[in-house]
Amino acid sequence: MALSTAERLERIGAAAAALVENATLVGLGTGSTAAAMVDALGERVQDGLSITAVATSNATRDQALALGIPVVRLDEIDRLDICIDGADEIDPALNLTKGGGGALLFEKLVARRANRYVIISSDEKLVDHLGDRFKLPVEVVPVGWVHTKASVEHLGLYPEIRMDGSEPYLTDSGHFILDCTWPHEKPDPAHLATSLKAITGVVEHGLFIGMADEVMTIGPDGEIETRTR
Ligand code: A5P
C-alpha cells in the first residue's frame, strides 16, 4: 500500500541514520529528507550513540543542537566519516542537482570532506538527465548579479533570480541564487559545471558531479533501493 510522504520521509530517514556508526564524524544535510534523517539520528543519540556532526545549513545546525547532537564547525575537523544529504535530481551516473533548499554551497563544502557521501531521496527524483524535472540553482555574489546573470545566459541557460517575497532570497552566506532552466538540448553536466565555475560572480552551482558514493531511494510503497558508484 502506498505510504504518505511523511511516512516515506520517516522510513528513509531512519534507514539512513542507521548507517551512522558510534564515535564518528557525520555531515548533516539540508532539506526535508535530510531533516527526517537528523530526527532519527537525534533519537539514536538520545539512546546513547556518540557522534560529532557538521551541519550544512543554519537550519540543520539548529535542528541538530535541539536534538542534543553535538555540532562543530567545518574548520574544526579534517575529514568526516560520512555525510548524508538529500538531492533534487539524481541521474543514472549518480550525478546530482542540489540547492532547492538554498544550501548548496555549504552542502558541497561539507560533502567534499566526507569519506562516504550518501544521498537519500524519494524515487521521483531519479531522472534520465539533470534538468529534466528541476531548475539548476546557481549561487552568485549580490554585487553585479545582473551581469553575472547575463554571463550565465551566454551558456544557454535561462536564469531567474530566486525571490523571498519582494526581495531576492539570501543564502546563509548572504548570496543570491539564480534558478536556471536548462536549454532544450541539454549540455553535458560536467562540462556545464566547469563553465559555470569559470564565471566571475558565480560562487557555486548545484551540480554535484562524481560526488555521491551511494544513493538510497524510497518508492511509493516504502521499498528502499541503494545504488552505488
Ligand atoms: C538543499 O539546498 C538541497 O540541496 C536539498 O538537499 C534538496 O533540495 C532536497 O530537499 P528535500 O529533501 O526537501 O526534497
Image (cartoon, rainbow, N blue to C red):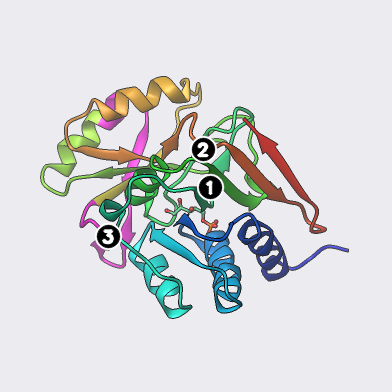
Q: Dot 1 corresponds to which residue?
A: 88
Compare residues 106 and 24 and report the one nearer the observer: 24
Quadrant assignment for the N terminus: bottom right
Number of marks in picture: 3
Label 2, label 1: how far apart the Cα atoms are: 7 Å
- Tell me the amino acid under the disc marked 2: Leu
Instruction: Classify mark 1: residues with Cα within 10 Å, few (<14), some (14-19) or many (20+).
Output: many
Q: Secondary structure at mark 3?
A: loop
Q: Secondary structure at mark 2?
A: strand
Q: Dot 2 corresponds to which residue?
A: 96
Residue shown at 61%/61% (left/top)?
A: 17
Image quadrant assignment for residue 73 = bottom left
Report the side of 3 relative to 33 (left or right): right
Label 2, label 3: how far apart the Cα atoms are: 21 Å
Q: Secondary structure at mark 1?
A: loop
Magenta-colored span: 152-175
Ligand 1 neighbours mark 1 (CB distance < 8 Å) = yes
Residue shown at 39%/45% (left/top)?
A: 79
Residue 61 locus on image (x, y percent)? 38, 68
Compare residues 137 and 95 and report the one nearer the observer: 95
Which numbered disc, 2 or 1, marks the residue that appears first in the sequence? 1
- Tell me the amino acid under the disc marked 1: Asp
Q: Dot 3 corresponds to which residue?
A: 172
Residue shown at 53%/48% (left/top)?
A: 87
Residue shown at 63%/42% (left/top)?
A: 215
Which numbered disc, 2 or 3, marks the residue that appears first in the sequence? 2
Which numbered disc, 3 or 1, marks the residue that appears first in the sequence? 1
Label 3, label 1: how far apart the Cα atoms are: 19 Å
Instruction: Classify mark 2: residues with Cα within 10 Å, few (<14), some (14-19) or many (20+).
Output: many
Given contact means CB atoms under 8 Å apart, are the residues at marks 2 and 1 in contact? yes
Compare residues 23 and 192 and report the one nearer the observer: 23
